[in-house]
């Protein structure tokens, strides 16, 4: 039995005060997610990540995948298949390389440092949001967006690369060039409203 007097008189802390192992904690959590069948959502938000764990690149996420509000500069190692939505907003991304090609839910890459949408999914069944970046054109955007498309608060001077079809609304305000509804409809089949 360890007595308090003995602990206080020792020059080093005894083993009972050694904290639980925390290294590889994230990888162990992801491995447990995979062992449990990759069902449901996988959230890596607010973890101060600067890169995605390597273990992610070969897994399928059965629900939504979120890695927003970190310090990611790249999506290298992101899951290739996500059955729900993919949210990588509020990071320091300069590229979307590594993102899945198809998203069943929504795709959010807002509040980053993107100058291009190269690497973005080709098709998004839900909404696609890329507002508050440094985009000057929409080159690399999905060719089809099932719901709303938000590209406001960028540095757009051109509609080059705009999706061919948008199933919901198209929001494109607070850019250096004030596009008109007619300009947007000339290059994109928008089913909903256009806010420019």
Image (cartoon, rainbow, N blue to C red):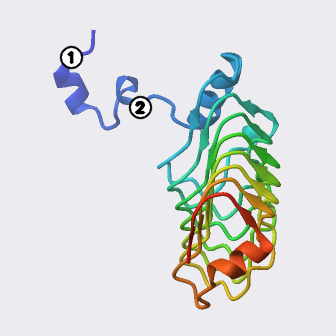
- Numbered tag placed on residue 73 in the rendering: none
Q: Which residue is mark 2?
A: 19
Which residue, as the protein is rendered here, is positioned at the far left?
A: 5
Percent from the top left, x then y, of residue 100?
78, 48
Q: Residue at x 70, y 76 (%)?
A: 184
Q: Is residue 135 visible?
A: no
- Which quadrant: the C terminus? bottom right
Q: Residue at x 57, y 53 (%)?
A: 49
Q: CA distance from mark 2 to mark 1?
A: 20 Å
Q: Residue at x 51, y 82 (%)?
A: 174
Of residue 118 and residue 123, the one placed in the foreground of this image is 123
Comparing labels 2 and 1, the label whose residue is closer to the camera: 2
Percent from the top left, x then y, of residue 160?
80, 79
Q: Residue at x 64, y 34 (%)?
A: 27
Circle 1 SS class: loop
- Which quadrant: the N terminus? top left
Q: From the viewer's perspective, is residue 177 above or below residue 17?
A: below
Quadrant of res 157? bottom right
Quadrant of res 91? bottom right
Circle 2 SS class: loop
Categorize mark 2 by other alpha carbons within 10 Å: few (<14), some (14-19), many (20+).
few
Q: From the viewer's perspective, is residue 12 above or below residue 140?
A: above
Percent from the top left, x then y, of residue 99?
76, 52
Percent from the top left, x then y, of residue 77?
76, 48
Q: Which residue is mark 1?
A: 3
């Amino acid at each position: 039995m360890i007595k308090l007097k003995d602990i206080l008189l020792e020059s080093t802390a005894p083993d009972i005060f050694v904290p639980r192992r925390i290294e590889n904690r994230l990888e162990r959590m992801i491995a447990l997610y995979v062992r449990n069948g990759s069902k449901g959502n996988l959230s890596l938000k607010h973890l101060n990540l600067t890169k995605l764990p390597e273990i992610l690149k070969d897994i399928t996420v059965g629900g939504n995948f979120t890695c927003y509000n970190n310090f990611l500069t790249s999506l290298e190692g992101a899951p290739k298949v996500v059955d729900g939505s993919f949210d990588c907003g509020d990071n320091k991304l300069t590229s979307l390389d590594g993102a899945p090609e198809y998203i069943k839910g929504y795709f959010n890459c807002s509040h980053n440092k993107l100058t291009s949408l190269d690497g973005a999914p080709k098709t998004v069944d839900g909404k696609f949001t890329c507002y508050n970046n440094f985009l000057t054109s929409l080159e690399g955007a999905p060719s089809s967006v099932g719901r709303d498309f938000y590209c406001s608060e960028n540095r757009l001077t051109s509609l080059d690369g705009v999706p061919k079809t948008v199933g919901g609304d198209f929001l494109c305000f607070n850019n250096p060039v004030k596009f008109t509804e007619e300009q947007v409809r000339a290059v994109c089949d928008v089913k909903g409203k256009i806010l420019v």
